[in-house]
Image (cartoon, grey):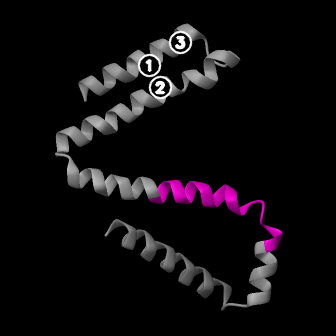
Amino acid sequence: MAMVTEFLKFVLAVVLYLRNQGGFNYEEERATFLSLRKTIPLYAVPAVIYSVYNYLQYVNLGLLDPAAYKILINMRIVISGFLMQVPCAPLQLCTYRYLWSNTRIFILGCNGA
């Protein structure tokens, strides 16, 4: 059912785009596509990731009780904090001490929620 929802969103977006453009001209759309072929993946990759995330969210809601689902959503924040150590620490974008203090704040926030 979740993939049907994502597909309907896609169809609605295409219909609204074509209505806004005043119809479909194959040659014009092809020329636009070819001129933007380096830009399109920048939008397509996050769109695919969003669709997969949305689908997995529906699957998780079907498999987990609400409390476990909320814990997993909160753990996402903690995991993001730990993953930020990978690019930050070696490049010294963040001070190491502040990095760990932010991670502790994330963990405390998740435990208090």
Q: Point out residue 32 in the picture as x, y percentages from the top left corner.
A: 78, 76
Residue at 30% from the left image edge and 27% from the top image edge: 110
User: Is the C-beta separation of discs 1 and 3 under 8 Å?
Assistant: no
Say the numbered circle drawn on residue 98. Answer: 3
Say the numbered circle drawn on residue 5. Answer: none
The amino acid pointed to by label 1 is Thr
Residue at 81% from the left image edge and 72% from the top image edge: 34
Pointer 2: what residue?
81
Pointer 1: what residue?
103
- What secondary structure is marked by label 3? helix
The amino acid pointed to by label 2 is Gly
User: What span is in magenta?
Assistant: 34-51
User: Is the C-beta separation of discs 1 and 2 under 8 Å?
Assistant: yes
Q: Is residue 110 magenta?
A: no
Which mark sits nearer the N-terminus, 3 or 2? 2
Which mark sits nearer the N-terminus, 1 or 3? 3
Q: Is residue 43 magenta?
A: yes
- What secondary structure is marked by label 2? helix
